[in-house]
Image (cartoon, coloured by chain):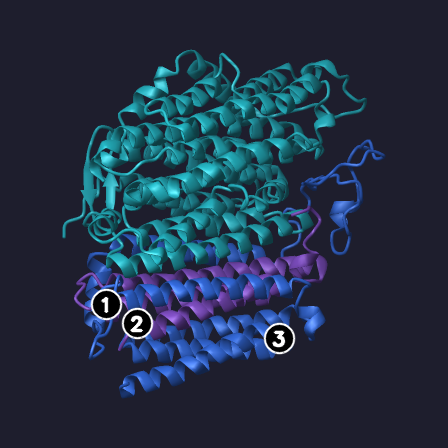
Amino acid sequence: MPIDFIAIMPEIVLTVTALLVLAADLALRGDAKQLVNPLATFGTLIAIGFTVFLWGDERTTFGTMFVVDAYAVVFKLVFLVALLAILGISWRFFAEGRYFQGEYYFLLLTSFIGMVLMPSARDLLLLFVALETVSIPAFVMAGLRKRDLYSSEAALKFFIIGVLSVALMLFGMSMVYGFTGTTDLVGIAEAIRAGDADVPLLLGSVMLVIVGFGFKVSAVPFHFWAPDTYAGSPMPVAAMLAVASKAAGFAGLIAIAFVAFEPLAEVWAPVLGVIAILTMTLGNLIALQQRDLIRLLAYSSVAQAGYMLVPFGLARSGSDAIAVNDAAVQAVLFYLAAYAVMNIGAFGVAIAVNRRTGLRSIADYAGLSARSPLLALALTVFLLSLGGAPPTVGLWAKFAILEAITVDVTAFGVVLGSFVVINSVIAFFYYLKVVKTLWMDEAREGLPTLQPGFNLSAVVVVLMVGTVVLGVLPGLITDFTSITSVLATG
Amino acid sequence: MSPLGPLLLATLLFCVGIYGVIARRNAVLVLMSVELMLNAVNINLVAFSNLLFPEDAAVSGQIFALFIIGVAAAEVGVGLAIVFNMFRNRASVNVDDVDLMRW
Amino acid sequence: MTGHDVVFVLVGLLTAAAAILTVTSKNLVHAALFLATTLAGIAGVFLVLAADFLALVQLVVYVGAVAVLFLFGLMLTRAPIGREALDNQNRGLAIGVSGGLFVVLSALIVDAVVGGSLGDTTVAEVTGPGIEDIGMAIFAEWVLPFEVLSMLLLAALIGAIVLARREPGDSGEEAMATRIDFGDAPPTEGTDSLSSGSLPELTSGERREGGP
């Protein structure tokens, strides 16, 4: 069985980079150790090059297990650009913090190997291994602040929830295997279509798998670990967990839901729709009461997961549902790309403010506009975008979801849409509260000056510009996402 | 041989594992309970693979079980390291002492 | 009922009993030993199901390595003994959730197996693939996940070392401590770096809520 090495080039490049980083860390001493960061960045750029090279190709290798198509390439690019941004915001943080730098970058790269595999995986086994490759390094990274109680606590909670969710997911997967006799996602869909679909045990197994992914994307009621883990982890790791790890969960959920369990969409779509409503409403209501910026971002990211689950609630089964399902997948993809840009940016600003001072309460951001107009402006843009204000990409992301609802209007779709609108209004309260603190309130005396460093500033500025440019010209993403389809090849 | 027996055994182990995860407060014991759940999955997979699909050339079920064993070993290693680190910081490995931040 | 079934019932009962004792035992070391028994029993189940290679792997990895690791874990963390120390107040909830789930799942399984929706349900003779088949499958069909798994194991190895090794000054302790102000000072055992505040005064009178 010949292997198409071009198709897995991004993964290979990341693997080689990870191993080089590990070796370089052994060879370098003292301050020179921070040079592993540009090395990792260089590797990521090469991986991005190969991914772009794959653009427009349709490749299938390892049987039907690994598929590269437009959908996978867009997803991989989102992950790799997120990796680039996270490397940028990590440099000074880890170099000055005297962490185990080389090991951190190795773990980060390994985690992203798992992520770029996710959107290509068309097999339960590969999905499982990729998901664990994302999670296990992340457990360690959450606990990297070894002497800090909050960090140990974050790691322990994240770990227990992570392994528990995987166990639930695997039990469901094993039952699905029993019914279908295959772990191939397309094969599973065919077997379910051929057999009688309404066996209660099969439906129960599907629910177990979905609950497992619900933990991964921190959907209510499986969200409680997320704010604590984000707040306790080192901040670049929190950014990575909030964005990339969540996106990996969505990649897996899309593959499972829209490819393997597509014939059962009538069963899981309402469930995921209700979960979406709960997630956005509860996430926003709790975020309203937060006084710590990281926890606010954490609960807002729970709410954002709710918006991203809305298109899942629209899914339909059958051959005439392809238009609806395609629109749903595209909406999720668009929202994820936009969410990655704005959320990493917000975490970047939080790192810039927090790194030297350790301050993270929202009150400590008072008067940021006077201390660092650039950071204040950037944070304002990111928060407004998360809220969905014009002229930012966040607005178009919300439009993409509403647009998916209009493809084929149903009563449930209208309910979902109205919840999206109501929640956007609620969310504006707490985003605007922070913005008001930034610009209107007086700064306290005696705060140290902010020195964000070149990399961090560059990442923040690029992301800020990206948020606005994509907001003015949303076609830049929609053109890419609109030609993607999981279903065409699956 | 009917798959009923192995499936029921697996379900029992899975639920016993869930009981352990909820009822135990020692983190190492919670980890043990999770291992029970993963082993239940393996019994399921092997039973399906050998009783229902013995003709499957890819041996999916058994391979899946092998991978789960490998990943579970990695999880235990990382998990115990996290628990040790916790213990070193606060001289306790109780899950419900982990409450600096509310759940 | 064939001899096969009788052996399975015996092994299965042993495994189930050991599993229940694992999660109810009041003594940590006993719990770990019961876990080892459960894992060995599962290897027996694999043998009955004609999965010889998996039974061997189960013995080597689980009984040989994981169970011993757990024993080390228990001893290094000097955990106390007794129901109070090991169990929390959620036992009622735990029995409810797990018992309920067991009743539901086993009813569904009986329904699916007896109802025949799980394919033809009884095989006269249990056969499984040999080691050769498994080896060929791993290195042909499943080589990609296999290679990814090798990366995962390396990451787990390095991650575990990073977390467990003690090296003052290199472990982030000189880093600025995370400051999450919930109103009360964090406990200080072993975290001198946390409490010795080089941080500017926060508005300390203000109480900050932690969560929901």
Instruction: Tell which tag, 3 or 1, sits nearer the viewer.
Output: 1
The Cα atoms of the two marked residues, 3 and 1, are separated by 39 Å
Task: Tell me the SS state at disc 2.
Answer: loop
Residue C42, how many percent across, how many down?
Answer: 40, 76
Q: Which mark is residue A96?
A: none
- What amino acid is labelled 2 in the image? Pro
Q: For numbered disc 3, what is the local secondary structure?
A: helix
Total number of numbered discs in the rendering: 3
Task: Please name the color used to draw chain B.
Answer: purple
Mark 1: which secondary structure?
helix
- Circles 3 and 1 on the same subunit: no
- Crowd band around label 1 with a 10 angstrom C-alpha radius: few (<14), some (14–19), many (20+): many
Please name the color used to draw chain A. cyan
Dot label at residue C28 = 3
> Which tint is chain C?
blue
Q: CA distance from mark 3 to mark 2?
A: 34 Å
User: Can residue A121 be seen from the camera position used here?
Assistant: no
Numbered tag placed on residue B52 in the rendering: 1
Q: Is residue C180 left or right of residue A351?
A: right
Q: Would residue A209 be found to the left or right of residue C17 on screen?
A: left
Q: Amino acid at mark 3?
A: Leu
Pointers 2 and 1 in contact (C-beta within 8 Å): yes
Q: Which mark is residue B3?
A: 2
Please name which of the two marks, 3 or 2, marks the residue nearer to the observer.
Answer: 2
Q: Position of residue A427 (x, y in %)?
A: 59, 25
Q: Quadrant of residue A444?
A: top right
Q: Position of residue C180 (x, y in %)?
A: 71, 39
Query: Which is nearer the eye, C96 or A399?
Result: C96
